[in-house]
Amino acid sequence: MTKLKALIFDVDGTLAETERDAHLVAFNETFAAHELGWDWSVKLYGDLLAVTGGKERMKFYAKQYHPSDPPLTDQYIAELHKEKTARYQEIIIKNPIPLRPGVRRIIEEARAEGIRLAISTTTSPKNVSSLLENSLAPDAMSWFEVVAAGDIVEAKKPASDIYDYALKELKLKPEECLAFEDSGNGIRSALGANIPTIITINDYTAHEDFTGAKLVLNNLGEPDQAFTVLAGDAGDAKYVDMAMLHKMI
Ligand code: XBP
Ligand code: MG
C-alpha cells in the first residue's frame, strides 16, 4: 500500500525555465528604468542565483559588486522588486514560458489519482499564479492545495522553512510527500524538512551538489522522450509517472 500523499513542486527552474528568459530580463529592465547602470549578464546571473529571492539577490549584488556606492535602503530594494515583479508578469503573459517535459503530465496524473499538490518556492506568490495560469491552465491555482511562496517565511531556501510550512499546511509527514527541485539550494531546503527529493537539472544548476537526492534526471521525460538518469536508480522506467513515484518512497 503506497504512502505517497502529495507532490510538492519548486517553481523556477523546475516547472519551467523562468530564470534566464523572464526573471533576468525583468531585473535588467527595472535597473535600466531606474538608470542604475546595472546590467546582469546571463553568466553573472548564474552566479547570483546562489542567493535566493529577488530582494536578497539585489542587495547581495549591490554590496558585492558596487561596494563603494551608498547602500540601498530596504525600502528602495522593495520598490525595485515590486517593479521587477510587475515586469516579470508582463513578460510571461506576453510570451508564456513552456512547462518542462513531463510536468503537465505528472500534475494531471496526480490529480486524477487524488494525490495532493503543493508549491514550495522562493519567488513571489504573484509570479507563481501568473506562471501557472498562463503555462498550465487558467484555473491551475485551484489545483494546488498549498502555495508556499516568497516572504511567507523569513528564511528562504536553502533553509527548510518553506518546506516545513508546506508540510504544516498539508498536515502531512515528510515521508508521505515527494519534492521536485532543480537546484542545490532547493534540495538542501527540501531535505532539511526530510522530504525525499527528485532533481531535474538545468543549465544553471547542472554542476551543483545533489547529494541525498532520490534521483537526479535531466528532466521528467515523456513516453516519447526518455529521461537521462544522472544519479540514483530509476529501475526500468524511461520517464517519470505516478506508478514510478509510488515505488520511490
Ligand atoms: C528561485 C529564485 C527566485 C527568483 C526570483 O526560486 O531564486 O528568487 O529568481 O524571484 P525557486 P523573486 O526556484 O525556489 O522558485 O524576485 O520573486 O524573489
Ligand atoms: Mg528552482
Image: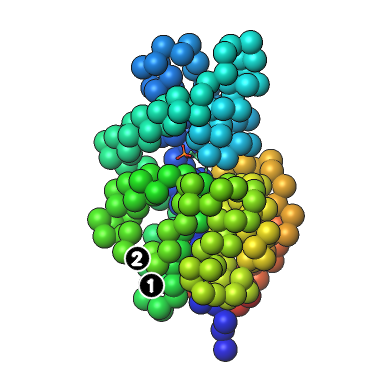
Q: Nearer the viewer, residue 105 or 94?
A: 94
Instruction: Tell me the mark number nearer the camera, choosing from 2 and 1.
Output: 2
Residue at the spot 47% in from the left edge and 47% down from the top edge = 150
Labels 2 and 1: the sequence-earlier one? 1
Quarter of the image where the C terminus is located = bottom right
Residue 230 shows in this picture? no
* Residue where numbered disc 2 is placed: 143
| Label 2 element class | helix
Q: Amino acid at mark 2?
A: Trp
Residue at the spot 40% in from the left edge and 67% down from the top edge = 145
Answer with the quarter of the image where residue 146 lies: bottom left
Q: Amino acid at mark 1?
A: Arg
Percent from the top left, x then y, of residue 89?
A: 32, 38
Assess whether mark 1 and mark 2 are in contact (beta carbons under 8 angstroms): yes
Q: Answer few, some or many: residues within 10 Å of disc 1's Cα (few below 14, many 20 plus, some between 14 and 19).
A: some
Percent from the top left, x then y, of residue 49?
A: 58, 35
Q: Nearer the viewer, residue 148 or 240?
A: 148
Residue 125 sits above or below residue 68 on the image = below
For this view, does 168 lie left or right of residue 137? right
Quarter of the image where the N terminus is located = bottom right
Residue 142 sits above or below residue 207 on the image = below
Residue at the spot 28% in from the left edge and 57% down from the top edge = 137
Residue at the spot 44% in from the left edge and 31% down from the top edge = 78
Q: Nearer the viewer, residue 41 or 170?
A: 170
* Residue where numbered disc 1 is placed: 111
